[in-house]
Amino acid sequence: MSQTADLAPLYGLVLAGGSSTRMRRDKAALEIHGRPQLAWGHALLMRHCQQVFVSVRADQRTEAVRAGFPQIVDSLDGIGPIAGIAAAQAAHPQAAWLVLACDLPFVDDDMLARLIAARRAGQPVTAYRSTSDGLPEPLCAIFEPASAALVREAIATGRNCPRKLVIASGVPLLEQVAPLLGNVNTPEDLAAVHGQLATGSHI
């Protein structure tokens, strides 16, 4: 976990504050790799970051799947994952944040290592390009301290889409070696993921 001297310390944030409406059950509790996705994502980030936190809504703090992890609680409701990013930046403004949504089961150590290696001084965000639509994937990305002003401005003006924030930042995007950024939003997605993992067809 060595960091270049001119870069901020790297903290991790597992985004687990969503309502999981389309899945119809808590995505953070889904067992895809033999344990809840939240625990899996936390362990993954721990191998790359100095500290790792879980992003939660206030009403989720005591839930069994979340209660055992260091938490950062959203201070704003109803604006999606950008609330978790903003709360993390407010809690530890000196840190860069490696943000990972809990519904990205194919992200691996190599993918995070490439993301971390691509950090550059003066670049507010480091992100991959999605293989599905060519746009940034902001929920497996690094937000440097300099991005906090962009996040605050986006929220203040009602532009709560992290993807649009990354686009507006103008940063270059990393190309994926393999399409590993597919997420799990529905029961059908979950069944497909289990099948892909069983056969190795996601690689």
Image: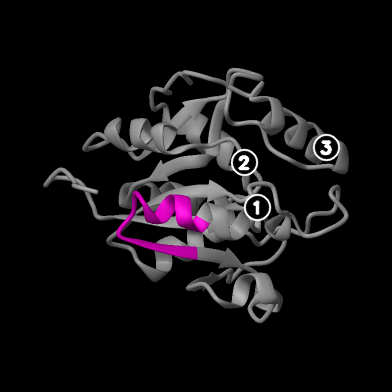
Mark 1–mark 3 CB contact (< 8 Å): no
Residue at x 46%, y 40% (from the top left corner) = 141
Residue at x 62%, y 51% (from the top left corner) = 102
Tell me which amino acid carries mark 1. Answer: Gly
Mark 2 and mark 1 lie on one chain; the one further toward the N terminus is 1
Residue 7 as seen in the image, left or right of residue 132: left
Depth-wise, is mark 2 or mark 1 nearer the camera? 1
Tell me which amino acid carries mark 2. Answer: Leu
Q: Identify the secondary structure beneath mark 2.
A: loop
Depth-wise, is mark 1 or mark 3 nearer the camera? 1
On the image, the x and y values in percent for residue 104 come to 62, 41
Residue at x 24%, y 34% (from the top left corner) = 120
Mark 1 and mark 3 lie on one chain; the one further toward the N terminus is 1
Q: Identify the secondary structure beneath mark 1.
A: loop
Tell me which amino acid carries mark 3. Answer: Ala
Range covered by the magenta-colored residues? 42-53
User: Could you say which is closer to the camera, residue 156 or residue 6?
Assistant: 6
On the image, the x and y values in percent for residue 93 come to 33, 63
Mark 3 packing: few (<14 Cα in 10 Å), some, or many (20+)?
Answer: few
Number of marks in the rendered image: 3
Q: For the residues marked 1 and 3, what is the alpha-carbon distance in whole angstroms?
A: 15 Å
Residue 34 disc label: 1
Mark 2 packing: few (<14 Cα in 10 Å), some, or many (20+)?
Answer: some
* Mark 3 lies on residue: 191
Mark 3 and mark 2 lie on one chain; the one further toward the N terminus is 2
* Mark 2 lies on residue: 104
User: Could you say which is closer to the camera, residue 160 or residue 89?
Assistant: 89
Magenta stretch: residue 45 in it?
Answer: yes
